[in-house]
């Protein structure tokens, strides 16, 4: 099994720490979980998240386009991470029983 | 990545995707490292975008476009308030005509219609200010178009008051 990879969730988690542009997101996600997203994967996630209203673009800085998480995005991220925590907790409990 | 390759890879995406993200994606590719892995990742993602388009291909336009900005409450509320104020004048004029006057019946304390008109026109000022502060730095040109529209609506509402001396 490799690194954890759910690009939209990783992008949301990265933006939860403040607005970022693409390259900064990639580096932050590497620090967060060791996964390095490719440019196509990253922009695929960005497009889907933005179209769902979970992230939004900020004014461009030079040639870089920063994004930030929206209030709805925070709610979604919280719900997803809570589910993951419950899943991890249940999984670890089963492992303890082995 | 070198610019011609970045442009070529960006062109692999569907047209609607490129209209929204093409420019920033191309700039993103140019400012990042190239390589076989990167190119393959973009090719696969572009192919995936053709097979499973974002939003079924009905992508929202740039959120900083004129139409997108106009959909925000702080953009359309002042317009609605100006038009409502104009409507108040119109209704007051009709009411006056129906009751034998040649237009709006003047009352010593200005009357309900005048107060409503004043409230609507004054009430939109903070909304207008909020809109300008929020959107001018993000999308100056489009925001100026919306502000011009709002100013036009406000002038249309004020014109009868000043022209007819109401």
Image: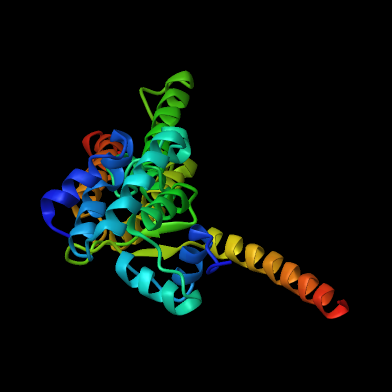
Q: Quadrant of the N terminus of chain B?
A: bottom left
Rendered residue at 19%/57% (across/down): B27
User: Could you tell me residue B57's position as x and y percent?
Assistant: 41, 33
Along the viewing direction, whichever of B41 and B26 lies nearer the viewer: B41
Tell me if residue B108 comes above or below residue A76 in the rendering.
above
User: Could you tell me residue B125's position as x and y percent?
Assistant: 34, 56
Q: Quadrant of residue A84?
A: bottom right
Residue B26 located left or right of residue B53: left
Rendered residue at 23%/40% (across/down): B11
Residue B141 located left or right of residue A88: left
Q: Is residue A78 visible?
A: yes
Q: Residue furthest right?
A: A97
User: Could you tell me residue B72's position as x and y percent?
Assistant: 41, 48
Q: Is residue B109 visible?
A: no
Rendered residue at 34%/43% (across/down): B46
Along the viewing direction, whichever of B76 and A16 lies nearer the viewer: A16
Q: Quadrant of the C terminus of chain B?
A: top left
Q: In this figure, which colouring scheme has been used for the structure? A: rainbow
Q: How many marks?
A: 0
Along the viewing direction, whichever of A19 and B33 lies nearer the viewer: B33
Residue A53 located left or right of residue B159: right
Residue B42 located left or right of residue A15: left
Rendered residue at 27%/39% (across/down): B12
User: Could you tell me residue B18's position as x and y percent?
Assistant: 27, 41
Tell me if residue B151 comes above or below residue B96 in the rendering.
below
């Amino acid at each position: 099994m490799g690194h954890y990879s759910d690009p939209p969730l990783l992008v949301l988690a990265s933006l939860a720490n403040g607005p970022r542009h693409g390259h900064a997101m990639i580096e932050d996600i590497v620090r967060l979980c060791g996964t390095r997203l490719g440019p196509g994967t990253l922009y695929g996630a960005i497009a889907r998240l933005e179209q769902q209203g979970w992230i939004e673009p900020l004014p461009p800085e030079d040639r870089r386009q920063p994004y930030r998480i929206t209030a709805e995005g925070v709610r979604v991220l919280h719900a997803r991470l809570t589910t993951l925590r419950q899943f991890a907790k249940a999984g670890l409990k089963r492992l303890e029983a082995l | 990545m070198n610019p011609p390759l970045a442009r070529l890879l960006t062109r692999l995406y569907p047209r609607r995707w490129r209209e929204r993200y093409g420019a920033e994606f191309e700039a993103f590719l140019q400012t990042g490292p190239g390589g076989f892995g990167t190119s393959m990742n973009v090719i696969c993602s572009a192919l995936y975008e053709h097979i499973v388009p974002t939003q079924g291909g009905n992508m929202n336009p740039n959120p900083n476009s004129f139409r997108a900005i106009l959909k925000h409450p702080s953009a359309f509320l002042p317009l609605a308030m100006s038009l409502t104020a104009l409507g108040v004048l119109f209704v007051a004029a009709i009411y006056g005509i129906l009751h034998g006057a040649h237009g709006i019946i003047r009352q010593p304390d200005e009357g309900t219609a005048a107060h409503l008109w004043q409230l609507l026109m004054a009430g939109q000022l903070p909304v207008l200010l909020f809109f300008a502060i929020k959107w001018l730095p993000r999308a100056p040109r489009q925001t100026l178009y919306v502000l011009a529209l709002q100013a036009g609506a406000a002038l249309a509402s004020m014109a009868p008051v000043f022209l007819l001396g109401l």
